[in-house]
Image (cartoon, grey):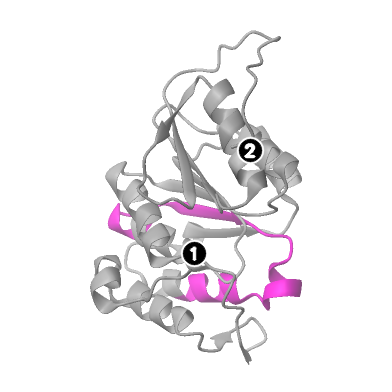
Amino acid sequence: MTMPAGDADLDVLGENFRHVLQSMYANEAQLGASGQHHHIDDTTRISVEEGLTLYSLCVEAGVTSTLEVGLAYGFSTVYLLAGLERNGGGTHVAIDPYQATDWHSIGITTTRRLVAASATLTDESMVLIEEMSHAALADLERSYRTFGLTFIDGYHRFDDVLVDFTVAARMCPIGGVIVLHDMWLDSIAAVASFLRSNRIDFVEIDTGCENLFAMRRVTDDARDWRHFVDFPLR
């Protein structure tokens, strides 16, 4: 269920970000790259509680580089950009191969308008990679990129999410955070269970949001090549 987007909840983000989110949560038609407005699917979003949690994780750690698998309409991206603005600037990279075909480029259009209106963010603050996540993440790793906060909300199959986390973890510095969305799905819950049991270089963070699973990197990955710990599916 999506929480209502009340003024009091979103004021912390700043006027521009609040205004955009209120319009999106109200299911108002949004501007796409073609210059036309399109109605949006009210099931493809994060809740206000989840979005403010992402914002808080970004701000509290002073993050200046964020990564996202799954842009869609840009709900979560708006919160992350608000966090970057609060931190004095930075870069957000969003991976979405279907931004133009499935989402009318609403996510990238909306977020680039916010960046253009910001006194802190620059043209380089919002980067879209329109490729499948396994390829895009590998390219980012080859470029020696690091991200203080990564939000994974793309394909929700167990193996896809596990691959996304595995590659993202190699770009996550000590102290960095990786967040999974949609814990109500068995596939995501199973990935989270595997990570709790096997990724001893990460510790789970209690975000207070049942639908989010977050882990902070605390050390290097020094597991033996044979390492495996059995895990429950939930």
Residue 117 % position (x, y): 38, 75
Q: Which residue is mark 1?
A: 46
Residue 143 % position (x, y): 63, 36
Quadrant that contains the C terminus: top right
Dot 1 crowding, Cα within 10 Å, few <14, some 14–19, many 20+: many
Q: CA distance from mark 2 to mark 1?
A: 20 Å
* 189 vs 19: above or below: above
* 22 vs 59: above or below: below
Q: Which residue is mark 2?
A: 190
Q: Is residue 219 left or right of residue 60?
A: right
Residue in the picture at 51% in, 85% down: 27
Residue closer to the observer: 103 or 65: 103
Dot 2 crowding, Cα within 10 Å, few <14, some 14–19, many 20+: some
Asked if one can make out residue 116 in the rendered structure from this viewpoint, the answer is yes
Residue closer to the observer: 34 or 80: 80
Asked if one can make out residue 121 in the rendered structure from this viewpoint, the answer is no
Q: Amino acid at mark 2?
A: Ala
User: Please, what secondary structure does the residue beneath circle 2 have?
Assistant: helix
* 71 vs 151: above or below: below
Q: Is residue 97 left or right of residue 151?
A: right
Residue in the picture at 66% in, 12% down: 227
* Lower sequence index among marks 2 and 1: 1
* 36 vs 56: above or below: below
The segment highlighted magenta reads 84-113
Q: Amino acid at mark 1?
A: Ile
Residue closer to the observer: 147 or 201: 201
